[in-house]
Image: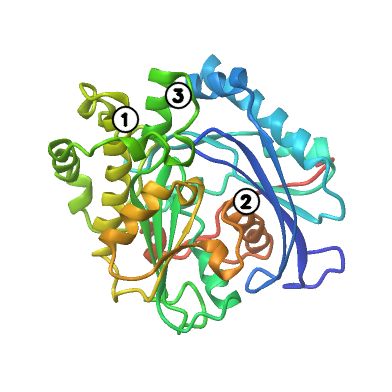
Amino acid sequence: MNKAGRIGAPLRALGAMSGTSLDGVDAAVVDTDGRWILGFGETGYRAYSDEERAVLRAGLGQWAGPKAEAAGRVVDGAHAELLAGFEGVELVGFHGQTLAHEPRGRGTCQVGDGAALAEAIGVPVVWDFRSDDVAMGGEGAPLAPFFHFACAKWIGAQEPLCFVNLGGVGNLTYVDPSFDEPEVEGALLAFDTGPANAPINDLMQERLGRAMDEGGALAATGQVEEGALELFLAEPYFARMPPKSLDRNDFSEMIGLVGELNDADAVATLTAMSAAGVAQGMEHCPRPPARVLVTGGGRLNPVLMEMLRVSLECPVEPVEAVGLDGDMLEAQAFAFLAVRVAYGMATSCPGTTGVRALVGGGIVSRPGN
């Protein structure tokens, strides 16, 4: 409930996202009532330093202990620094940093203290979005699909379309905008398609001391090793029906598949694997989409985008083609989801995470409480 005490009244919400690519924190303002996007506001970005990124990398795969705690301190400090610069915000959606994700095992682990962040910036914070979904039998990911549905309505889409997010891990949301609400059966289907930028970034860091293959420059000079690509696509994950999700390190053996290749061929092959995962995922769509809109860092890689265009049978474009911001879409999603949590609305459903029933996960922490 907002300051005026009106259920469902529009709120100015600020969302923050620290993704599996470990580049930094994105923050973005969305005006919304939790159902419709009413407008987009200010955005911001705070890069992690090399030292901070090393602490976060060391925390990956940890569920507790000193390395996870150190990663949490980095996440809390970076978010407080960035979010304190926003004014006129009524609510914050704070995703934190995923260190481990094992929905069919130990659960899911995102570090970041939403209560401490609320105290630091003086604004109510919604956080821990995934735990309730996992507790009810869901995958806990992906969580952006309800926002993707709102985006499809915002751009006036008339035909089914797909949003493909290429961050550290790739995920796909199929949206049928003929439905009125995202939780209605058939309106959404979502799942992780496979690794995207994470293995490329890891290999670049390991071999060349660089954070990424910027602009796909190295991949553009290499050749794809088809044998390694075939082994990758033989992974049982691709035969599983969605919804389904991945941990950042679930396909860590990919780097082993390209271990004997030179740098350019290795990166080209990892890039092809990312595109092939999306192409495999498209086979699960209930109807062929009219277009694919790509968000996340992968849309800035022309080699990856061309691989997608060649393998898919519909137009493939960055989300900027419809006036959206591919750098900020996930941060905007958590602003939108925060409002839904505050109003007791669902944030995931059987078609998005496989959860048994509609669930609206998240904790609301208020300053001074």
Q: Residue at x 26, y 37 (%)?
A: 269
Q: For mark 2, give the secondary structure.
A: helix
From this view, report whether residue 161 is shown above or below residue 98. Answer: below
Q: Determine which of the numbered discs, if any, sits on residue 62 in the image.
A: 3
Q: Residue furthest top?
A: 66
Q: For mark 1, give the secondary structure.
A: helix
Q: Position of residue 153 (x, y in %)?
A: 56, 77
Q: Of the residues shown, which amino acid type is indicated by label 3?
A: Gln
Q: Nearer the viewer, residue 42 or 208?
A: 208
Q: For mark 3, give the secondary structure.
A: loop
Q: Of the residues shown, which amino acid type is indicated by label 1?
A: Ala
Q: Residue at x 57, y 34 (%)?
A: 23
Judge the density around disc 2: few (<14), some (14-19), many (≥20) Cα neighbours within 10 Å.
Answer: many
Return the residue at label 1: 264
Image quarter in which the C terminus is found:
top right
Residue 147 visible (yes or no): no
Q: Nearer the viewer, mark 3 or mark 1?
A: 1
Return the residue at label 2: 331
| Lower sequence index among marks 1 and 2 | 1
